[in-house]
Image (cartoon, rainbow, N blue to C red):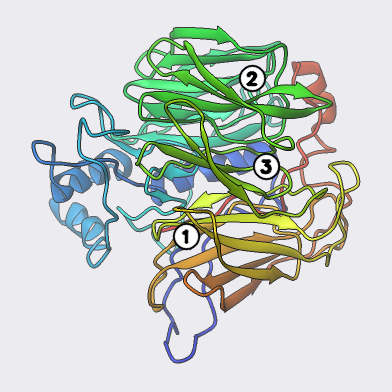
Amino acid sequence: FRLKPSPPIPYTLRNTPLCLLCTALLAMSPPRAAAWALLLALSGQRSVQGWAPGRPDAVSLLQRAAEAAVGHSDPKARAAQLSQTAGHEFPPAPAAGAEGSPSAGAPLMMWPTGRGAVGRYGWSSALRAPFDLKLAWSWHHPKGRFHTLTYGTAVDGQGNIFLSAADAIRKFSPAGELLWEHTTLPAEMPDAAALFDGAVYSKDTHGRVFALSMDTGKELWSTKVCDGISQDNGFVTSHGGVVMAATDMREEKNVAVRDLNATDGAPVWTVMPDVNVWNFMASFPGDGTALFQDQSGQAYRLRVSDGQLLWKGGGFTGSWTDGTATLGSDGLFYTVYNNEPNNVTQGVGPDSQGTLCAHSVADGSEVWRATTPRPPNNAPAVGRVYGYPGYTVVQPMGQQVLQGAPTDVYAYDAATGRQRWVFRGPRQSRPWQAGDIEGIRERVASGVRPVCLPNPWSAPTID
């Protein structure tokens, strides 16, 4: 659903929708959450990657995207849809053939990873979603609503949706037709897949990183990198001709970050952070480096070519968070962590404080930090929110698997860390997240993990 904030001071947002999409998993079963994720991908989570001289210009590209994803054949309907993009600022994207960009003949992508495009993670700056969302279509596993677990979506330039689930990656047309599926059971796929240069990249719990053809779903290559991979739910990412993923499970946690050649899957390098990673995602500034955080919220910046550490810093020693770091379009790297020693099984209390911290990409220095009143168990989104100057950081909060625990969404000034607004979500009505207990038997029978234990909110998207 979309959020409408209280009017800020001195800016007025009365009767104006906040440009934010955030799916609440608390009240949904995983299959229903998947249907909403697909709907959001159709209606709002659209980013267009990498237009440049010699490629389609922004207007024609947006028109093609709107026609493909919305299905308007009437010129007036198309014009109405495209007029919603008026006034949107498009962050810079790498030119075709530049370092880190797709090759000159590669197809453009609306939403190439579970968190969007390089340069605008969590920010769908190309098209605006309608405020009154209406269900266009839905899908669940044909053998039952709880037969699998769904983890994320990516969207190509034609509006086709690639749904990552525990049992398979599936490609859907904009109208919801299943085009192909690639299954891996008994190995499960815990991460959201990435699209790059005509391939879909993912990994599985048996220690494989692999690539599929976007057109057919056929395997292009598969590399066995370790004995096993944990089932925390992160993001496989690809940029600059490489694929980056968290691997090497030790005591149910991934302790390594691996970099592979995106063309043939050849290993490039392996890095062992100070502590394990959790819900891993690599962010790429587009300068030949990559950033990520470990379980404790410590940030790292590496050189993509050889894995050389450029800097590391921050975090809370001995802590664990279910959150994920995000690189903002403003040149800052945002990390999250909880402000107390804990572990995955112990968790934290409903009002345990955490930290949202902004780091300089250049040297890792802390620009600002904000104490969060609840656990920041999620990835922040950074972008331009209507009615506010500059960039805004949107951070969902709450502790899952805790009956009665409150859930909130906070927004902060990205330059200073000053709070801008807060949306009070529902309290969690059950000891477990919705759909977890109800679907245990069906998931066990299907061969996937019995429960998901998802965050109170999904990762947010600003449109």
Identity of the amino acid at label 3? Answer: Asp
- Other-residue count near label 3 (Cα within 10 Å), few / some / many at <14 / 14–19 / ≥20: many
Identity of the amino acid at label 1? Answer: Val
Up-down: is 72 above or below 275? Answer: below
- Other-residue count near label 1 (Cα within 10 Å), few / some / many at <14 / 14–19 / ≥20: many
Identity of the amino acid at label 2? Answer: Asp
- Estimate the spatial distance between the alpha carbons at disc 1 and disc 3, rounded to whole Å: 20 Å
- Estimate the spatial distance between the alpha carbons at disc 1 and disc 2, rounded to whole Å: 31 Å
Query: Which of 246/190 is in front?
Result: 246
Q: Is residue 143 left or right of residue 284?
A: right
Up-down: is 229 above or below 125? Answer: above
Q: Which residue is mark 3?
A: 294
The answer to whether residue 324 is visible is no
Query: Which of 176/412 is in front?
Result: 412
Taking the spot 53% from the left edge, 20% from the top edge, the residue there is 269
Q: Is residue 231 left or right of residue 37?
A: right
The answer to whether residue 90 is visible is yes
Taking the spot 76% from the left edge, 16% from the top edge, the residue there is 447
Give the quarter of the figure containing the C terminus. bottom left
Q: Which mark is residue 230?
A: none
Q: Is residue 392 left or right of residue 167?
A: left
Q: Are marks 1 and 2 in contact (CB under 8 Å)?
A: no
On the image, the x and y values in percent for residue 408 come to 68, 67
Which mark's residue is nearer the viewer, 1 or 2?
1
Q: Which residue is mark 2?
A: 167
Q: Is residue 304 left or right of residue 350?
A: left
Q: Are marks 1 and 3 in contact (CB under 8 Å)?
A: no
